[in-house]
Amino acid sequence: MIRKILIANRGEIAVRIIRACREMGIETVAVYSEADREALHTKLADEAICIGPAALSESYLSMEKILSAAVVSGADAIHPGFGLLSENSKFARRCKACRITFIGPDAETIEQLGNKQMARNTMKAAGVPVIPGSDRAVYDVETGQKEAEKIGYPVMIKAALGGGGKGMRLANSAAEFASCFQLAQSEARTAFGDDAMYLEHFIEHPRHIEFQILADGYGNVVHLGERDCSIQRNHQKMIEEAPSYILSEEKRREMGEIAVRAARAAGYVNAGTIEFLLEKSGAFYFMEMNTRIQVEHPITEWITGIDLIKEQICIASGESLPYQQKDITFSGHAIEIRINAEKPEEGFRPCPGTITGLHLPGGKGVRIDSAIYSGYRIPPFYDSMITKISVWEKDREHAIQKAQSALGEVIIEGVDTNVDYQYQILTNPEFLAGNVDIEFIEKMQEQRNESGSRI
């Protein structure tokens, strides 16, 4: 059994993991940078260890410092949360070398699924539908142009080891390809230290549907339903729903079965997410698999009643899943809204600073995942997300009403936030009707620019 977990993360996900550990009787160790000395996760954990200055490379991304903290504190496991080192195969491998349990899949699986080209080939071999694209990594313009002609324009050029929207360019025609490829490759080289690219056919106006997977070390795999993550800006999700408004029970069953097949094909163990792009025609394609807990995991917990963090820990402890697919049931509708310290009317500029006043909503069916408090200083060095609000109700209509009510109750003084912007999404007629795709935010921005209205 795991007895002590070091959380190699910060912010609300660190707080979330600490709470789950407390309920399981597991001791926790928080790590923090000098900029996070007064952060909430350092106050809630049983122990807290400073691992360096504010810069990520010298603190939260320093494997040596995090592993040293684990050894010194006597932690027998590390939970990486999301982002940072959560999908770093080298870190998972070094944890194993130090005889520390990495709460996530093994290094080989992370490598296989982290490389988009390898993941695509694995899924294709397993009969999982994939977007038409290149079968091998592409390193030069000439090879890329030949592949693009086979695939058919428009094509998306992506970094093989990319993520977060970096190293991506859309080429609508052969005339645009060379410049788009060179820009994407240059960005990939800078962001990921690798210039391997791959190409895929660009699907117009799709929805982003992802299935939550749990898999133990004994060959048992289940899915916990889907999340619709189509409301996103620059490939960063903003509002998520579970279940998806657009899926029929037949389509849900089909996609869920394929998601399980995809996880089995990868030999996956622990919690993961199979991400699909869904066309209006109903056709869907594997996009990628995230080998970690997702930011939006609370809405899956709402509709299933299953605590994903606890399940991660149990699986990493060597336990088998206590249920089969037939035991998984879904209830109601859940929505998550991400609250960021940013200024939407100025291009979503991050707005760090001190919170001088704070009130967050509560009540039946409202959940707050947060690490902020009145007097807390949001540092300028990290992601701008400061709080997640998720709600549950019996159906989508009532869940939206509850989300609107909860968001209308939020008071965060001292810093600018995207609360008003998110509220306007929740009241947008197209959102209310469920007519959304991954270009929804861009369309809304265009409409606002044309009308001259301010957010």
Image: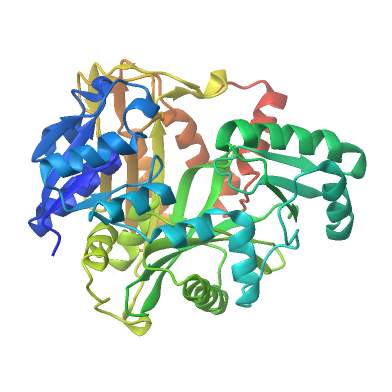
Tell me if residue 232 comes above or below residue 448 in the rendering.
below
> Going by the picture, which residue comes out furthest to the front?
97
Left or right of 288, for residue 204: right
Left or right of 276, for residue 396: left
Left or right of 331, for residue 263: right
Percent across and percent down for residue 165 are 60, 40
Residue at 71 percent of width and 53 percent of height: 137
Does residue 368 appear in this view?
A: yes
Percent across and percent down for residue 252 are 52, 73
Q: How many marks?
A: 0
Does residue 362 appear in this view?
A: no
Left or right of 280, for residue 181: right
Residue at 82 percent of width and 48 percent of height: 144
Q: In this rendered view, identify the residue nearer to me: 139 or 213.
A: 139
Percent across and percent down for residue 258 are 55, 75
Percent across and percent down for residue 157 are 73, 45
| Quadrant of the drawing holding the C terminus | top right
Which quadrant holds residue 169?
Answer: top right
> Going by the picture, which residue comes out furthest to the right?
175
| Quadrant of the drawing holding the N terminus | bottom left
Tell me if residue 171 comes above or below residue 150 in the rendering.
above
Residue at 60 percent of width and 69 percent of height: 122
Tell me if residue 263 comes above or below residue 39 in the rendering.
below
Residue at 62 percent of width and 73 percent of height: 128
Q: In this rendered view, identify the residue nearer to me: 59 or 340.
A: 59
Tell me if residue 455 comes above or below residue 219 in the rendering.
above
Task: Specify how the rendered protein is coloured.
Answer: rainbow
Which quadrant holds residue 417?
Answer: top left
